[in-house]
Every structure is written in structure tokens, then in C-alpha cells.
Image: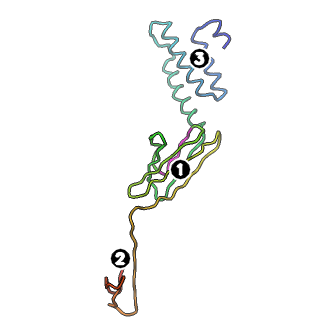
Amino acid sequence: EKAFVLDDNPRWLYNMARCKEKQADYRAAVRLIERYLDGYRQRNQGQDPSDAEDAKRLITDLKRRAFEALPEVEVKSVPTGAQVLLGDGSTIGSTPVNTHMEPGRYKITLKLPNHTDVEAEMAVPQTGKVSLVFGLKSKQKQAAIAVWSNIRGAQVAIDGKVVAVTPFQG
């Protein structure tokens, strides 16, 4: 960093990025490599440095590692397949979903056709894992009944009205 103050050559930015990578400060490393590429282009009439492709691959790798370093969040539902939405309306996936998120508090909504939406608040800690499981209520009011008797053909009445004869399933 001191060398860059004395000599603003972009190569120092690249070296600083590699140091940030060793410190597991992946986001800072990404910003420094991007500054390195921009600085090199400014000094060289828009030309990329000879290691530009390697630098771009490193940026992709650092972004992946930055994402994976975030706390893990797992959301499940019964039944599965519910869309998980954040308070800002963005979708993080369908249950079961595993992702990584910035620490903080989030409002989430689970949506599944023919089921009542579930809204909750989730706290993502600085480190560790959050695992949430939600039971979704069906909007459809259905029931099943089965009636057997020792007399075949016996009448089955519901609220005084004959609706079937034994044996009956429905």
C-alpha cells in the first residue's frame, strides 16, 4: 500500500489484491484486481494487460469464495417446492434451498400454489448456519372417509342424508 502511494503503478494493486486474498478478504481483493485492470487500461490506451484473462478468472474465483464464506442459509418446507422470496421481492429459490447470505435480519415469504403464504423474519448470524423448516397449510378443504361394515350394502348417511352404501371410500 505504501509503494502504491509512492508509485501509482497498477501492478501494486494486483499485489495488494493477492495479499487481501491471503487474508480471506475476498471482496477487497476483487475491488483491487478490478482497479488494477482499469488502471492498466488507462495507462496503456485501453489495452488489457497480458495477464487480463488470468485476472478475470481470479475475480470469478474470488467472488465464489466470498459467497461461500458467507453464513449458510437453508430453508425447507412441507410440502416442498415453495418459492422463497426476500422482503425486496427477489427470489432465492424453491424449497429445499441452500444458499449463503450477508449477516442481518431478513423478511421472507414462502409461496406455494393452493397453500397459504407464510411470512417470517430470519436472522442470519455473522458466522454459522441458519436452518428453517416451515409447514404450509393447504387452502383446499378436503377430507377422505372410508366406511366398512359387516353388512354389505348398508347405507352411509351424512347429516341425515344417504350418500353411499358400504363398503365406501371417498
Q: Which mark is residue 14?
A: 3
The answer to whether residue 57 is magenta is no
The mark that comes first in sequence, 2 or 3, is 3
Mark 3 to mark 1 CA distance (whole Å): 43 Å
Q: Residue at x 64, y 24 (%)?
A: 20
Quarter of the view holding residue 133: bottom right
Q: Secondary structure at mark 1?
A: strand
* Foreground label between 3 and 1: 1
- Residue 30 in the image, given as x and y percentages of width and height: 56, 24
Please say if the residues under marks 3 and 1 sit with CB atoms less than 8 Å apart: no
The mark that comes first in sequence, 1 or 2, is 1
Q: Which mark is residue 3?
A: none
- Residue 94 in the image, given as x and y percentages of width and height: 45, 49
| Direction bottom: furthest residue | 151
Q: Which residue is mark 2?
A: 170
Query: Which segment is the magenta one?
Result: 95-101
Q: Amino acid at mark 2?
A: Gly
Q: Amino acid at mark 3?
A: Tyr
The answer to whether residue 98 is magenta is yes
* Foreground label between 1 and 2: 1
Mark 1 to mark 2 CA distance (whole Å): 36 Å
- Residue 59 in the image, given as x and y percentages of width and height: 53, 25
Q: Secondary structure at mark 2?
A: loop
Q: Which residue is mark 1?
A: 120
Please say if the residues under marks 1 and 2 sit with CB atoms less than 8 Å apart: no
Q: Secondary structure at mark 3?
A: helix
Q: Of 64 and 130, which appears nearest the observer?
A: 130
* Foreground label between 2 and 3: 2
Q: Badge 2 local density, few (<14 within 10 Å), some, or many (20+)?
A: few
Q: In which quadrant of the rendered image does the N terminus lie?
A: top right
